Image: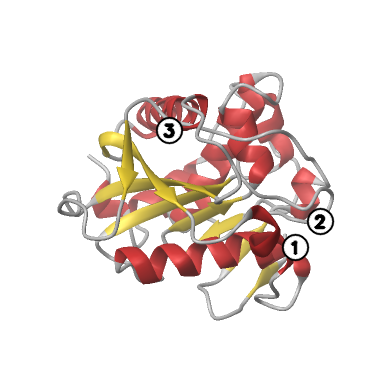
Amino acid sequence: MEEQQATNPRFSRRAALLGAVAAPAAGALGSLAFAEGAGAAPPTGTVRVYWLRPTDVPYDQRYPDGIANVMRETQRYYRQELGVTFRLNDPVVEVVAGEHDAAWYENTPNGGEEYWWVVFNMQQELMRRLGLNAPDRRWINIGEISAEKEGVSGGGGGGGWAILSGHDADGAAGLGGDMNRWYGGMVHEMGHALGLPDSSFTDGTPMSASFYSYPNCHFNTQQKNGIRNGPYGSFLS
């Protein structure tokens, strides 16, 4: 899988696995409407999850609820595979009212290749408004945005981040078919956030295209050790 460096951390790109999949948008159980100067940040050592809603995208509770469900299933899967897992916050999803309409996120150049524009624009806004870093040793950060240029926009993960565009948000919200596709996708991206590379071939692990067969995919011993001994291994308990 190709990696690309912009002003953001190094990300493993999902283009080769996801192709030009385009779906509708996502959500989470328990949500927090974000405003500048809102309450204190959640505890460190946790996974923070954001749904960024552009100004022209109406609020839809299916997105925060659905994204939270995907994160809980991912949390369950990691415990099943590793015996330990990451911690989510309450609420699971922080709903962020975006500063721009969807077309701005889709069409404002950022990071060279157009594939990255939507998610890099989202990530940089989250970093600026929430005081986040990349990488950020306080939290693992998962960002989803309801914006996507069909057949162009994508996402990826690395350096304690996963940044995902509209089809992942739609899938989590129940608008993209079989939920196992979206569970497997988040397991894959969380693996990148925790420091794992892509597998070089379809090998039955979620770090390859085998994540499409979720839940019939499993980490191998090398991947388990890579997570436990990686930069965010201490986040797992």
Q: Residue at x 21, y 60 (%)?
A: 37
Q: Give the crowd class for mark 2: few <14, some 14-19, many >=20 residues within 10 Å.
A: some
Mark 2, residue position: 152
Answer left or right for 112 relative to 35.
right
Q: How far apart are labels 1 and 3 at the CA level?
A: 24 Å
Q: Is residue 112 above or below residue 25?
A: below
Q: Is residue 62 above or below residue 107?
A: above
Q: Nearer the viewer, mark 3 or mark 2?
A: 2
| SS at circle 2 | loop
Q: Horizontal and vertical percent for residue 65?
A: 43, 25
Q: Horizontal and vertical percent for residue 20?
A: 83, 46
Q: Amino acid at mark 2?
A: Val
Q: Residue at x 27, y 44 (%)?
A: 236
Q: Residue at x 69, y 71 (%)?
A: 108
Quadrant of residue 3 within the rendered picture:
bottom right
Answer left or right for 93 relative to 115.
left
Kindly identify which numbered label has been placed on residue 115. Answer: 1
Q: Horizontal and vertical percent for residue 212?
A: 70, 30
Q: Nearer the viewer, mark 1 or mark 3?
A: 1
Q: Amino acid at mark 3?
A: Met
Mark 3, residue position: 71
Q: Give the crowd class for mark 1: few <14, some 14-19, many >=20 residues within 10 Å.
A: many
- Asked if the residue under mark 3 is in contact with the one under mark 1, i.e. CB atoms within 8 Å, the reply is no
Answer left or right for 203 relative to 68.
right
